[in-house]
Image (cartoon, rainbow, N blue to C red):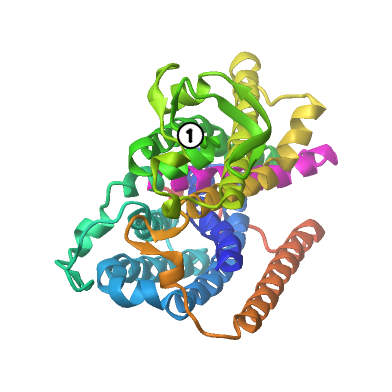
Amino acid sequence: MAVSLGFHIVFAALGVGFPLLTLLAHRRGIRNNDPAALELARRWAKAMAVLFAVGAVSGTILSFELGMLWPGLMGPFGDVIGLPFALEGVAFFTEAIFIAIYLYGWKRMPATWHYRSLYPIVVSGLAGAFFIVSVNGWMNSPAGFSIAADGSVTDVSPLAAMFNSAAGTQYLHMLLASYMVSGFLVAGTYAWAWLRNKRTPMHRLGFTIAFGLAAVAAPLQVFIGDVATRRLVDAQPAKFAALELLPETQTRAPLTVGGWLIDGEVVGAIEIPGLASFLGTYDFGGEVPGLDSVPPDDRPPDRIASMVHLAFQVMVGIGTGLLALSAWYGIARWRRKRLPRSQWFWRAAAVSGLAAVASLETGWMTTELGRQPWIVQGVLRVEDAVTNAGGIIWSLTAITVVYIGLGAVTIIVLRSMVQRLESGLDAPAPYGPAPALVE
């Protein structure tokens, strides 16, 4: 499941962010009579279609894994969380239909209506992301059911389950992460080209649109991440304790940089007094929960808590670096009305996409591992939900091979598209931004 989610989440993020990038480019082309922006939208749409197809395959595999690997979850709780899965299917098919309309609409539809067909793609991606993230929010903050005396699930309310207390913050956090991953990844390709002295108006425009989206999302992500983390103090105290590597509940708790747990003791860490308390309570002397705030059987093992802590710090560290890079870009555009000229900025921008993906992966590790030993917080343990079937190593091997193949094919196809563009074999934009076409 970790292999599948680790692969699919990147394409899920691109499935949310890439349509918006395409819409922004096409909107500029229509409104400003900008043929470079129109051509950029057409090129991005082709990449969007490839990424959507790969995401569809990897997501379909996940839907099978939920039933096969987690019968103890899907059996008793399928009625509780089935609604968002069904609605996500509707959003997926809607997005697929309008991607096809947009791709084949060039030269076959009026320019304005063709441009407007991007909006259902963007909205469908936003809706699909909410439905899936709401299920994960439910796993962190279960709602919409009761447990009878005999252990059966009763009083099922799918809507209450879907709109659980964690869904809102987790959705916004994932949405902004999707925009950052998409923006920085796309901008990174243009920054790499810029370093190789490919500085055409299209390269400049592609970088500006993509990096601009990511730069707007970065500070908002810091705020939402802070809200989501502070929520854990009461909702999931053991997860908060693992994030901050706090074995004991305490006041003026230090922020632990690095380090890990061995036999319940923190080793190899740098401590900043009071900062963990401030992050959890806005008070340097506030009390925040440690791992001892929950019974021993409900605590994550030391190795899991250490992994959560380190993954969280990698996510925060990368996010802080991307925020600083975004500020550098914003200051240069505001004060000098131009792109930054420093080679160090362009080098950092070139790797920002990979850094954003690493932050996304470690953030997802934080969410999932931080809930251990629960798969549904306080209700169902991982050991009671997972299948007891044998031969899992063979399905793991098969899944890993499939994902390696999908990743390789994706890279080959995208590189082939780029090579065709650079060689001039690709056709130009099927229609130009002539005023007569704009209503």
In the image, residue 378 lies in the stretch drawn in magenta: no
For the residue marked with disc 1, what is the amino acid? Answer: Glu
Question: What residue is at 47 percent from the left and 63 percent from the top?
Answer: 102
Whether residue 81 appears in this view of the structure is yes
Q: Residue 100 location, x and y as percent?
A: 47, 70
The image quadrant that residue 257 belongs to is top right
Question: What residue is at 40 percent from the left and 33 percent from the top?
Answer: 230
**Badge 1: how crowded within 10 Å, few (<14), some, or many (20+)?**
some
**Picture layout, residue 417 above or below residue 345:** below
Question: In the visual, does 235 lie left or right of 210?
Answer: left
**Picture layout, residue 200 above or below residue 57:** above
In the image, residue 176 lies in the stretch drawn in magenta: yes
Q: Residue 378 location, x and y as percent?
A: 33, 55
**Picture layout, residue 169 above or below residue 427:** above
Q: How many marks?
A: 1
Residue hosting label 1: 248
In the image, the segment drawn in magenta is 171-200
